Image (cartoon, grey):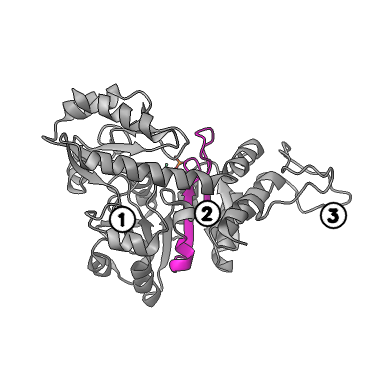
Amino acid sequence: MKFNTKVIHAGVHPDTATGAIMTPIYQTSTYVQEEIGLHKGFEYSRTGNPTRATLENNLAAIEGGKYGACFGSGLAAIDAVIKMLEPGDEVISTNDLYGGSYRIFTTIFEKYGINFHFVNMLDINNIKEKINSKTKLIWVETPTNPMMNIIDVKAVCDIAKSNNILVGVDNTFATPYLQTPLDLGADIVMHSVTKYLGGHSDVVMGALVTNDNKIAEEMYRIQNSSGAVCGPMDSFLVLRGIKTLHLRMQRHCENGEKVALYLENHPKVDTVYWPGLKTHPNHNIAKSQMKGFGGMISFTLVGDQLESAKSVVSKTELFTLAESLGGVESLIGHPSTMTHASIPSEERIKSGVVDSLIRLSVGIEDISDLINDLEIALKV
Ligand SMILES: *Cc1c(COP(=O)(O)O)cnc(C)c1O
């Protein structure tokens, strides 16, 4: 099955009881047992629920994996990955990553004796320098948030393999429409399903996908033991959202390109960070590991004044000021005071998140309306 068919059909079957073509919302906590231990594969909805299971199979298929597990949020999915480790283990992570991931690593798991190193993965040597016998996981985010750096996933996996280290990739920004990290050698793919997979800004959810039996066993054990699962209604909404993932992503990419080119030629804009631009420092890696460049764009303003950034984000109307991304509607955000406020300012600025940096999640509206909206906001 090709990708555009998988999003609609993979793992999804008409309901055996009624013939309903859409997966029913099995809004139930428990399941009848005809006699002790004799059931239809479901016992309790923390452990397994048919609506969630359908989504998990669909997600696994579109990422090119065998096993999928859904969680109550993207961070709950990351939580499950780190719980596979032991006290004393070390993790090497991208330095420029989602603020919430940084927060869970440093304020939750460091307390339990897991140590994190945040490195600039654009230079693979920075990873090599931190590897020792305690290194158990390399955590990659690409494109990174919000600087849109592109990490060479295959190169990271090659180093990891030769040192017996697992690689986890946060694939939230790219989605499997644009890149499939398992095919590049990664062991675990993670998603904030909240974003492009759900696609309609109406659900908070996370997911993990893997091909490895042992990792899958751990993943399901933690999902059931820690219990951070998602509900059947949310699973239904995401199943519905994923059916148009390919169409939405195609338009996100088209609109993203037009907005990036517009901003690049705007006199008030200093630097545009979008991996599809030839001037982007990692454009070639992006071209080799991604099928397109997506709808996430960051840019800075000439003069780098906090006030000018605040003015721009307050003036757009179609680009709504909000956290989050990946929905059909366009959003605008100010990373240094919003999504990345939890990262210490010194570290934030070092990774490029300066005061005038603005992040756009370009939606799938008409492109001329979007450009017009930016034109008005950048005028004054
Ligand atoms: C939003 C996001 C997360 C966290 O996901 P939630 O669903 O908000 O818990 C993790 N990584 C990236 C890249 C994100 O954008």
Q: Which residue is mark 2?
A: 208
Quarter that holds the N terminus: bottom right
Amino acid type indicated by mark 3: Leu
Q: Residues within 10 Å of mark 2 (few under 14, many from 20)?
A: many
> Real-space Cα distance between discs 1 and 3?
47 Å
SS at badge 1: strand
Q: Earlier in the sequence, mark 1 or mark 2?
A: 1
**Is residue 290 toward the left or the right of residue 226 in the image?**
left
Q: Earlier in the sequence, mark 3 or mark 2?
A: 3
Quarter that holds the C terminus: top left
* Residue 376 is covered by the magenta coloring: no
Residue 103, percent from left and from top: 35, 43
Q: Nearer the viewer, residue 52 or 22?
A: 22
Range covered by the magenta-colored residues = 180-208
> Real-space Cα distance between discs 1 and 2?
18 Å
Residue 300, percent from left and from top: 20, 39
Q: Which residue is mark 3?
A: 38
* Residue 191 is covered by the magenta coloring: yes
